[in-house]
Amino acid sequence: MNSNRNERKGGVLTEVLALKNITKDYPGVKALDDVSISFEEGEVHALIGENGAGKSTFIKTISGAIKPTSGTIAYEGKEYPYLEPKQAIDMGIAVVYQELIQFEAMSVADNIFMGVESESKGLVVNEKERCEKAKALLAKFDCDVNPATLIRELSIANRQIIELAKAMVRNAKIVIMDEPTAAITVSEQEKLYQVVKQLKADGVTVIYISHRLEELFEICDRVSVLRDGQYVTTVNIEDIDKQDMIKYMVGRELSNAYPPKEPAQSEVVLEVENLSGNGVEGINFQLHKGEILGFAGLVGAGRTELMHLIFGNAKKTSGIIKVKGKEVHLSSANDGMKAGIGLIPEDRKFQGCFIDKPIFWNISISDIDHLTKGGVVDQKAEMKLAEDYKERLKIKTPFLKQLTSGLSGGNQQKVVIAKVLASNPDILIFDEPTRGIDIGARHEIYLLMNELAESGKSILMVSSDMEELLGMSERIIVLHEGHQAGEISKAEFSQERVLSFASGI
């Protein structure tokens, strides 16, 4: 057994939470099928599985967001058929979601104590005392953020710490962390790991959900695996390796996590000369036909801003953009598409697709002109196009008229990619292509990217995942505070070299 595991009550590990025979049915879908998993006091317990495996349904059952169809929840020895959201909060169950729900125009202290004052008389007396209490709480997490700072001014990592502070002020006993490192840098990850270890030292049970399997070995005690809504296994972290995790998750082995590809051709398809605007300055590079060119940098370095500048979503202040040797003037996304550039944005839900529209509609919308005859959309051709991309990208859905919001994160990302590919661009921008996506879906997207590159498409890829960046790119351009800090060839790839440029060293 892992020596890091907390032992309680005379050396006996104490069960604090157990979900027993939980089933959750939706029309046509069994999201959870007779799942039983228990959690111990003061452990960090990973929950892993592919998108659509049932992880979200599982944590929503714990937090009271949904009621199971059958089964029971045991908390501190008492059984319940289900939990209400307020009941779960009062019991000490807190969830830090991947997409943080915060009051961005309010201060750190206001966010931490939101809702506490009205329920706990005298807990907060005045603004000064509230800030002092917030500062003391944040110090516990080694966070020196000023409590008067507005939430919108913080990094994602610090915003996550604020969520944890909110949980602690409510005396949380169980904290569920949903993809906490998906949007933060390598250096910020280390800070988060220390926070998790501190929670564990305080006897808090952490349920940790992540698609970055390598980080589980850093902080977790046990790992439970779900696949297709069913429980697979629970294993001590010291008794499993990454390949075994993948095999449990996908039901098969995945060789070559980053599949090899043919080298790029010599033809230059995109030239950026001294480009400035949208927070970046003096950017210079060339993109070759069939190349995957990676872009690295810390949060705020200007990677996404540069991509929006190249696509036409933002206006340049100076510099030149050439596509296939011809200068282009881009002042809108439509201009970018006409120039043969396609953008798969970082935020798939709000920028990449229309989440409340059907899958077929999202896929066909970028090619709607070609599907329209005499002002009327050819519905047969539209469905054929959507069906072709469904098969090509292996989008898992029972029917294409389903709303896109009902898909898992990985399948939503495939819909976004299909939507962009339908406009047939020669240059593709992948901004964080696999953020929040499971290992199986990642592998499929990597294979697709290589297939596109080998068919003559060219790719600009922004990624905060160091392994992904080094594994998929042929060259890497590193940005630091809006400036081009360096360019690294494949032969020179190393994490240390990337981080050195990214840190401005």
Image: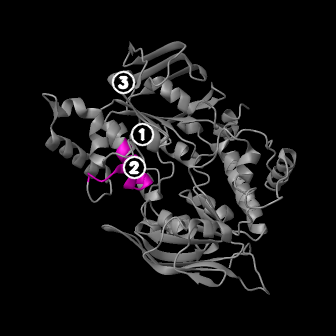
Please determine whether, in this image, residue 28 is positioned above or below residue 274. below
Mark 2 is on which residue type? Gln
Please determine whether, in this image, residue 230 is positioned above or below residue 212. below
Q: Main secondary structure of the magenta part?
A: helix
Q: Residue at x 60, y 49 (%)?
A: 100
Task: Say few, some or many: other residues with alpha carbon within 10 Å of mark 2 (under 14 / 14 to 19 / 20 or more).
Answer: many
Res 147 seen here: yes
Left or right of residue 21: residue 277: right
Label placed on residue 352: 1
Q: Nearer the viewer, residue 399 or 46?
A: 399
Q: Position of residue 337 (x, y in %)?
A: 35, 26
- Ranked by sequence position, the earlier of labels 1 and 3 is 3
What is the quadrant of the N terminus in the image? bottom right
Mark 3 is on which residue type? Asn
Q: Which residues are magenta?
A: 400-416
In the rendered image, which residue does mark 2 sit on? 412
Q: Residue at x 32, y 67 (%)?
A: 27
- Ranked by sequence position, the earlier of labels 3 and 2 is 3
Please determine whether, in this image, residue 391 is positioned above or below residue 341. below
In the rendered image, which residue does mark 3 sit on? 334
Please say whether residue 412 is one of the residues in the magenta stretch. yes
